[in-house]
Image: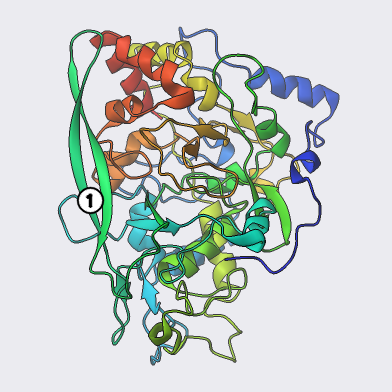
Amino acid sequence: MVASTAPTWADPLSDLPRTRDDLSAKDLARVERIVAPATDFSGPEPFERMQGGAGTSTKLVNRDALSHANANLSFEDGQRFKLGNALFRKLWVSSPASTLASDGLGPLFNARACQSCHIKDGRGHPPEGAADATSMFLRLARPARGEAELAALQTYLAASMPDPVYGGQLQDLAVPGLRAEGRMVITYEEQPVTLGDGTVVSLRKPHYSVADLGYGPLDPETTLSPRIAPTMTGMGLIEAIHPADIVAGADPDDGDGDGVSGRVAMAVNPATDRIELGRFGWKAQNATVRQQSAGAFAGDIGISSPDAPRSHGDCTPAQTDCMRMPTGVQSDLGDTEAPDPVLELVTFYSENLAAPARRDIGDPQVLAGKEQFYGLGCATCHRPKYVTSRQAAHPKHRFQLIWPYSDFLLHDMGEGLADGQPVGRASGSEWRTAPLWGIGLTETVSDHTFFLHDGRARNLTEAILWHGGEAQTARDGFAALDRVDREALIRFLESL
């Protein structure tokens, strides 16, 4: 959707800070020492177990391991977290309904609740032969046409151009009396890969199409990009990272010649109408947790909010039957279906889901795997640690040593992972470096081990072998390892 307010400056990149303005010289020197890359792998680093700083969850490892509140919340904020959790789990219904504060679903939608996609606040998965595609959908986008659309993309007023009929994503569900847009079809082609020690790993290459289109054909230039729901771990702490620390990692022209050229993502924050650093989403197309939440409300559930006031969700003018459906806007509650405090509470919940404590950090195999992680260059993009800003919006997020394992930059991952769909500043082959904290709990929490943006990888080994482009050297180094060293690296990832 194109924002209504123009950007407030011509070159937003130049406006981003290059140095930490929240620290004294003494504190800055201390922080630089703390976040320096590890060089000693004989034992764990100080505070390495506490991935989310003082807010780290040290509770029992089970299916709820990613659903706990930051441990340092006050009692009052704990209550807000619980209210946000209730709204996150809330099942919305179609309009009109007797439950006036819960209607407004759709009319076209992919899920009835946030929790439906982010089950136990963990990672989504592809359908895997079943009809349930709730935690995965297809993004739709086409090239810009005409000067106005091109200008909207270049000035960040739009992240992409939607299909003229089907909008920005394919909704496979609809309220009673309305046709769904269609259903995603996935087929896989197995591709064997021989590793350096002779081990053969089969990678599955996905092919995507759409069946049972309810509103005519897609635009011939519309591309399909699959998305699984990402884990919710530590989102508020990611937002609390000082922008200068992310900008410092960017090297768009590969000035140091290491083959890695991360780029900063930018996005319009609808709450401020300012262009800010993009941090969230598979292509870093959102600046804040609130923006991410509002977009999911509108696109996935069809629920309007102050930051995305689209009461018909992703319906387009071409879908006249959809546009005629009633909405859930109640004049006595506000002019959207999820007015504040609903959006505010869901945002607060999302910002305060705790990062889990590390496991087995002193195990010799884990330490050996960590050394491989650094030696192969994985830590170049999956930057291990930060100290958050002293000026972060939430006091409990301030000045925390955190370990998300991401630089939050855009990287070209090669043709193997390319979706051909530009989003914001990201090209069709660029993706935000995915944070790794909590990745070792995927099977425990989500009951599967599917990874990458579309879940094509069935385990961590396959996920690494799909890396290409700027990560090709690291990927090839992993493929050349013997079994003992590969297993150590995987064990390290499983400890995160």
Residue holding disc 1 = 186
Q: Secondary structure at mark 1?
A: strand
- Identify the residue at horizontal 37%, vertical 48% (top origin): 122
- Identify the residue at horizontal 28%, vertical 70% (top origin): 213
Image location (x, y in percent) of residue 325 = 41, 88
From the viewer's perspective, is 157 left or right of 118? right
- Identify the residue at horizontal 73%, vertical 66% (top origin): 5
On-image quarter of the N terminus:
bottom right
Count how many numbered circles sit on residues in the image.
1
Q: Is residue 256 above or below residue 59?
A: above
On-image quarter of the C terminus:
top left
Image location (x, y in percent) of residue 231 = 41, 47
Q: Is residue 209 above or below residue 266?
A: below
Q: Quadrant of residue 318?
A: bottom left
Image location (x, y in percent) of residue 132 = 22, 60
| Residue 170 visible in the displayed image | yes
Nearer-the-camera pick, 62 or 299: 299
Mark 1: amino acid: Ile
Nearer-the-camera pick, 100 or 382: 382
- Identify the residue at horizontal 49%, vertical 63% (top origin): 162
Residue occupying the far right of the picture: 25
Residue occupying the far left of the picture: 129
From the viewer's perspective, is 209 left or right of 424? left
Nearer-the-camera pick, 288 or 210: 210
Q: Is residue 435 above or below residue 354?
A: above
Image location (x, y in percent) of residue 202 = 19, 27
Q: How dense is the environment of label 1, judged by Cα within 10 Å: few (below 14), some, or many (20 and up)?
A: some
Q: Quadrant of residue 284?
A: top right
